């Protein structure tokens, strides 16, 4: 079996959105030790695999994941739209276990003792480590949406922002809509998981309604965005909202004070006063009477918060206490030595997305192998953010950007023409096309295979 060399770099084509692999050579001696990885999403699975691969099996890896299989958030909106099934986005951990020798433990972490290099598990007992990698994903802050604080409310008003049972349940709610009904989706202030995701979901719901009820449907999709503007693929989604789905979608930027009545299925909110010099600054918008309400609830790292194990360990050290600050050369926590945080839980300037978690995992894996071998992290890591966004059941767009390390500001910065450029922006597809949709499937299969196979 031919193993991927860490010196290899699979160059990224803008339209293809392919995966970057990595990076430098390790430096130092042969790596050894025990690395515990918490969380089996794109970040956790990728680092477990690549630690085994790049250490040539000398680093022992234990992956702790509470679920028996992984369900992908990327392209899960196609399940909601009706063109993919849950089986299409579900994968087991057998490849990591059988091919790469990763020990899989189905459990949850309830405490981290960084001083003792030990974690406590929900099922009981403790586990020691030489290096700990946390990729726990996100929790949802229901308290920030009035009307949704109870468990009963949360069982009826779905976010479906973690792929799984809610994905199927939201699809069923859409199937119950009749022509003339309204679907309302809200988008929290950034950062949130998958910047283009809410906009693509709105498009796929609109496409579903038009396909089901005809091009002249009176059904509506209302997008309440707490951000002042579209957060990703601005050209794509501006065209999608105004032209492709212009008869169905209404986009409302700057929505705030969103209040949901789960019984009456209404949504109240405020918007900026059209006259910026007038008082009050915010005015009440008309009440939305909706058949389906789909709030994307504000996030924080899973385990952060007043009673969370991540916060108790001192790892949720961003200014707002929601995320974990890291050194982007190694993704080691800035608060605790020998603990690394990748994926959605990390505050590192990169988007919170599956492809990015895969990239962060490779940078982190490379750094850990170097460190365990007595070397130092690569001083010039490179990462690529790439994703495809379906706009209809057969067309998609894409976005890609390459990040390089800015040694002056000690952060990853978008690169342009081979150099770090503060003003560089992501490259966006010039059109929404069937070809992009086909390439999206190739991209997704490559991402899943690279992370789990």
Image (cartoon, rainbow, N blue to C red):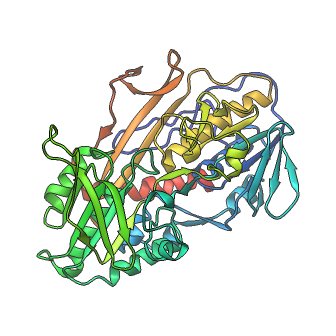
Q: Is residue 437 visible?
A: no
Q: Is residue 280 left or right of residue 330?
A: left
Farthest residue, direction top: 408
Q: Tell me if residue 249 comes above or below residue 39 in the rendering.
A: below
Farthest residue, direction front: 279
Q: Tell me if residue 90 comes above or below residue 280 in the rendering.
A: below
Q: Quadrant of residue 208?
A: bottom left
How many marks the image carries: the answer is: 0
In this rendered view, identify the residue nearer to me: 10 or 380: 380
Q: Which residue does the image show at 65% across and 56% down from the upper left?
A: 40
Q: Is residue 378 left or right of residue 106?
A: left
Residue 247 position, x and y percent, is 13, 66
In this rendered view, identify the residue nearer to me: 240 or 349: 349
Q: Which residue does the image show at 18% across and 52% down from the upper left?
A: 239
Q: Is residue 247 left or right of residue 81?
A: left
Of the 4 image quadrants, the one containing the C terminus is: bottom right
Q: Is residue 385 visible?
A: yes
Q: Tell me if residue 300 comes above or below residue 209 in the rendering.
A: above
Residue 447 position, x and y percent, is 51, 52
Q: Quadrant of residue 381?
A: top right
Residue 237 position, x and y percent, is 24, 51
Residue 374 position, x and y percent, is 80, 23
Q: Which residue does the image show at 48% across and 34% down from the upper left?
A: 349
Q: Which residue does the image show at 68% across and 68% down from the upper left?
A: 68
């Amino acid at each position: 079996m031919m193993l991927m060399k860490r010196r290899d770099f699979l160059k990224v084509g803008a339209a293809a959105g392919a995966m970057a692999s990595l990076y430098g050579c390790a430096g130092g001696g042969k790596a050894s030790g025990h690395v515990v990885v918490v969380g089996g999403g794109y970040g956790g699975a990728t680092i477990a695999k690549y630690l085994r691969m790049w250490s040539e099996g000398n680093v022992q890896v234990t992956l702790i994941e509470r679920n028996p299989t992984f369900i992908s958030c990327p392209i899960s909106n196609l399940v909601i739209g009706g063109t993919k099934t849950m089986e299409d986005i579900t994968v087991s951990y057998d490849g990591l276990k059988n091919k790469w020798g990763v020990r899989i433990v189905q459990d949850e972490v309830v405490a981290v003792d960084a001083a003792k290099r030990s974690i406590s598990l929900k099922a009981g007992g403790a586990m020691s480590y030489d290096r700990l990698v946390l990729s726990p994903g996100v929790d949802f802050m229901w308290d920030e949406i009035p009307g949704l604080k109870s468990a009963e409310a949360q069982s009826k008003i779905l976010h479906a922002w973690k792929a799984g049972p809610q994905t199927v349940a939201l699809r069923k709610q859409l199937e119950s809509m009749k022509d003339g009904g309204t679907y309302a989706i809200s988008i929290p202030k950034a950062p949130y998981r998958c910047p283009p995701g809410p906009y693509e979901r709105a498009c796929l719901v609109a496409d579903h309604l038009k396909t089901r009820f005809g091009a002249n449907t009176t059904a509506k999709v209302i997008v309440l965005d707490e951000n002042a503007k579209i957060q990703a693929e601005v050209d794509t989604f501006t065209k999608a909202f105004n032209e492709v789905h212009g008869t169905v979608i209404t986009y409302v930027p700057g929505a705030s004070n969103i209040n949901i009545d789960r019984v009456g299925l209404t949504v109240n909110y405020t918007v900026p006063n059209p006259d910026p010099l007038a008082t009050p600054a915010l005015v009440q918008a008309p009440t939305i009477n909706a058949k389906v309400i789909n709030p994307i609830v504000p996030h924080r790292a899973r385990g952060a918060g007043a009673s969370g194990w991540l916060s108790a360990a001192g790892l949720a050290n961003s200014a707002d206490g929601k995320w974990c600050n890291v050194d982007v050369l190694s993704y080691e926590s800035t608060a605790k030595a020998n603990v690394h945080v990748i994926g959605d839980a990390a505050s590192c300037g990169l988007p919170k997305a599956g492809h990015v978690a895969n990239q962060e995992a490779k940078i982190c894996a490379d750094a850990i192998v170097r460190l365990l071998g007595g070397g130092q992290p690569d001083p010039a890591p490179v990462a690529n953010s790439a994703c495809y966004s379906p706009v209809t059941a057969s067309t998609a767009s894409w976005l890609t950007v390459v990040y390089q390390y800015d040694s002056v500001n000690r952060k990853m910065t978008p690169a342009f023409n081979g150099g770090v450029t503060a003003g560089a922006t992501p490259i966006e597809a010039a059109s929404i096309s069937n070809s992009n949709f086909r390439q999206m499937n190739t991209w997704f299969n490559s991402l899943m295979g690279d992370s789990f196979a």
